[in-house]
Amino acid sequence: MHVFRVQLRKELLELWRTRKVLIVWVVLIAFGLMSPLFAKLTPELLKSMGEQQQNIQITITEPTTNDATDQFVKNTTQFGLLLGVLMSFGAIAGERERGQATLIFPHPLPRETFALAKFAALAILFGVGLLLGALADLLYTLLLFDAPPVGGFVVLVIFIYLWLLCLIALSLLASALGRSMTGAGGLAFVFVLVVLIASSLTRFAPGKLTDWGRTLAIGADGPAQWGALIVTLALTVLAVAGSAIALRRQEIE
């Protein structure tokens, strides 16, 4: 446990020094703030476009809290996915390519501890960033709309976080399997693409978890997606374990 804490501290410090903390937090907070604003202004923009084009008639409904929630889900999942992959696929492959891994593994550091610390640091990074973004979204939603159901909104944020962790774990697995940054990036893209496609084909895919969270956040009726939750958690654990196994079998040069 002591070795893990030391490695985790090192990973967190590296995220801070490379400004990845600043990038992730600023992006997630910015889109948390902008989501309610987008929901509020989009109907006005469409209305002005309809006035300019007299032959086009646009029916616009008054934006609501649910529109702000939908915008938050859309922005957070899209940009969270992009950030998660970009911050993860080079976590291991990058150190191997730069030759840093050869300086780490001769020391008594188990490779499973190394992989777990990488994942834990990224989980903390995105967990704090998503929390700050959600608080910013909630604050601005209260200013522009009515308050959303707090309990449902909290569950939505938790489900988005679990979904992001699954994608981060898969990208980390790609980083452990890839022999270069290019290979790891390509493999991460394939993993994420498979998950996204599966979300449109089966109700057990991780993407259904965010759909369930959205349903709870807007107070709508919809089926519970326990299968998607179980698959997301299992896939995350297996991906992190797979990263450790892949590292253990590799000869680090």
Image (spheres, rainbow, N blue to C red):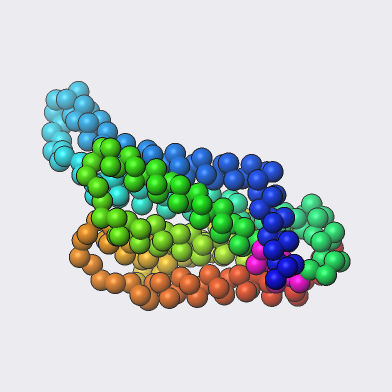
The boundaries of the magenta stretch are 110-117
**Corner quadrant of residue 237:** bottom right
- Is residue 179 toward the left or the right of residue 207 in the image? right
- Residue depicted at 59% across the width and 57% down the height: 122
In the foreground, 215 or 157: 157
- Is residue 12 toward the left or the right of residue 204 in the image? right
Residue 111 covered by magenta stretch: yes
Task: Report the number of numbered marks.
Answer: 0
Q: Quadrant of the N terminus?
A: bottom right
Answer yes or no: is residue 177 visible.
Answer: no
Residue at the farthest front position: 2
- Residue depicted at 28% across the width and 42% down the height: 142
**Corner quadrant of residue 141:** top left
**Magenta region, main secondary structure:** helix
In percent of width and height, residue 84 lies at 54, 54
- Is residue 249 toward the left or the right of residue 234 in the image? right
In the foreground, 230 or 11: 11
238 lies above or below 16: below
249 lies above or below 181: below
In the foreground, 127 or 244: 127
Answer yes or no: is residue 68 visible.
Answer: yes
In percent of width and height, residue 223 lies at 25, 71
Q: Quadrant of the C terminus?
A: bottom right
- Residue depicted at 72% across the width and 61% down the height: 7
- Is residue 240 toward the left or the right of residue 74 in the image? right
Residue 174 covered by magenta stretch: no
In percent of width and height, residue 99 lies at 82, 55
In percent of width and height, residue 204 lies at 38, 73
- Residue depicted at 31% across the width and 36% down the height: 37
